[in-house]
């Protein structure tokens, strides 16, 4: 029972990869996502994990990349497509859209400040906000609880 909680659902049709750096992943990530920092792609030897190789162009399976706002994910997607990945998708809008549409239940930890709704750049509200300590690391959670599912239902 405990081993099944240590990984996403068996026979999952998608592999969700967070391409931000590991620290950002540790602070906040989508439940079930694996950390795969974009820097890993620049390794000349073995840039891909076994999971990625199992999903690469596999029938009925897709790989989904995401970051905060598509900037890093689009670079990673371009590199991976150039290297023969044909079943690759990007999560449209990244965590920024997730924060707006599903503020609770879909991620562990606290959304990065860049993903939260903010006023126009340089607004008084932004300047007045005190510097906040970094949020604690997120819970390492692979599956949605009934409570999580309740929060994301419309």
Image (cartoon, rainbow, N blue to C red):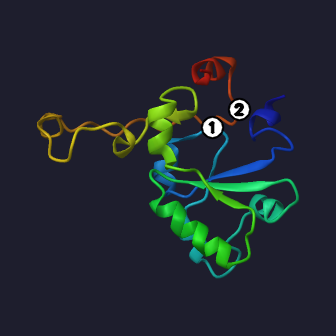
Q: Residue at x 60, y 67 (%)?
A: 77
Q: Which residue is drawn at 34% across and 40% down?
A: 134
Residue 85 spot, x, y in % from top left? 73, 70
Are circles 2 and 1 on residues that touch, CB within 8 Å?
yes
Image quadrant holding the N terminus, namely: top right
Mark 1 neighbour class, 10 Å CA radius: few under 14, some 14 to 19, many 20 or more: many
Q: Which of 142 and 113 is in front in this view?
A: 113
Q: Which of 148 and 21 is in front in this view?
A: 148
Determine which residue is flagged by label 1: 31
In this picture, is 48 found above or below 26? below
Residue 98 spot, x, y in % from top left? 51, 38
In this picture, is 119 found above or below 15? above
Q: Which residue is drawn at 44% across and 43% down?
A: 96
Q: Quadrant of residue 112?
A: top left
Q: Which residue lies furthest to the bottom in this view?
A: 44
Q: What element carries label 1?
A: loop
Q: Nearer the viewer, residue 70 or 51?
A: 70
Q: Earlier in the sequence, mark 2 or mark 1?
A: 1
Mark 2 neighbour class, 10 Å CA radius: few under 14, some 14 to 19, many 20 or more: some
Q: Is residue 116 visible?
A: yes
In this picture, is 32 found above or below 143? below
Residue 23 spot, x, y in % from top left? 47, 51
Left or right side of 111 for 78: right
Q: Residue at x 11, y 37 (%)?
A: 124
- Could you give the CA–CA distance between mark 2 and mark 1, rounded to whole angstroms? 6 Å
Determine which residue is flagged by label 2: 143
Counting labels gives 2
Q: What element carries label 2?
A: loop
Residue 30 spot, x, y in % from top left? 58, 40
Left or right side of 145 for 94: left
Left or right side of 125 for 137: right
């Amino acid at each position: 029972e405990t081993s099944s909680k240590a990984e996403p659902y068996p026979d999952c049709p998608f592999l969700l990869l967070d391409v931000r750096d590991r620290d950002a992943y540790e602070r906040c990530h989508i439940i079930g996502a694996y950390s795969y920092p974009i820097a890993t792609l620049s390794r000349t030897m073995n840039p891909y994990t076994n999971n990625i190789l199992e999903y690469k162009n596999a029938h009925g399976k897709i790989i989904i990349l995401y970051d905060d706002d598509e900037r890093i994910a689009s670079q990673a997607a371009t590199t991976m497509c150039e290297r023969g990945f044909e079943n690759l998708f990007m999560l449209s809008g990244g965590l920024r859209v997730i924060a707006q549409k599903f503020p609770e239940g879909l991620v562990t930890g606290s959304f990065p400040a860049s993903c939260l709704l903010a006023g126009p750049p340089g607004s008084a509200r932004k300047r007045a906000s005190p510097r906040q300590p970094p949020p604690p690391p997120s819970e390492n959670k692979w599956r949605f609880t009934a409570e999580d599912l309740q929060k994301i239902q419309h």
